[in-house]
Image (spheres, helix red, strand yellow):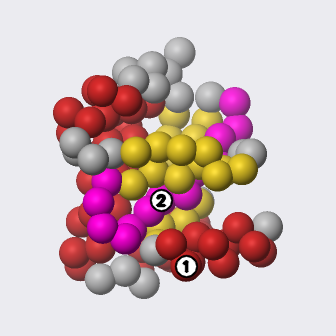
Amino acid sequence: MPLRLYYRPSFKRSLKRLGHEQRKIAGLILESLAGYYSNGCNLQEAQKIAPRFFYKQLRKPYYEAGVEGNIRVVISREGENCIAVLAGNHDQIKQFLDSV
């Protein structure tokens, strides 16, 4: 069964703080994540959507995904559910990880 992607209210709030171009990048990250999850976590499939897509574990249960620039998306994995927690730059993600 493929992983499912959900969004926390904190993620939606973090998107509002981004500029137009940054939101477009976050959308591309989400599109790539959907391709990644729906194809059994196949990185090559996600890179067909965005060639520079990356996905890495920060610390359990948090993962980071990105495609370009300085915008990243933090995901929390809970079984088959993946929850988008935050969209932001490196400093915002570091600040989030220091607070949890």
Which labelled disc corresponds to residue 73? Answer: 2
Please provide percent x and percent y for residue 78. 70, 38
- Residue linked to disc 1: 91
Residue found 37% across the figure and 71% down from its top: 70
Can residue 20 be seen in the rendering of this structure?
yes
Looking at the image, residue 3 lies above or below residue 59: above
Cα gap from disc 2 to disc 1, whole angstroms: 12 Å
81 or 54, nearer to the observer: 54
Please provide percent x and percent y for residue 81. 61, 36
21 or 4, nearer to the observer: 21
Query: Where on the picture, by quarter, is residue 79?
Result: top right
Residue found 62% across the figure and 28% down from its top: 80
Amino acid type at image mark 2: Val
Query: Where on the picture, by quarter, is residue 44?
Result: top left
Amino acid type at image mark 1: Asp
8 or 49, nearer to the observer: 49
Residues rendered magenta in the picture:
67-79
Label 2 residue SS: strand
Side (left or right) of 37 relative to 68? right
Which quarter shows the C terminus?
bottom right
Can residue 7 be seen in the rendering of this structure?
no
* Labels in figure, total: 2
Is residue 75 on the magenta stretch? yes
Looking at the image, residue 71 lies above or below residue 2: below
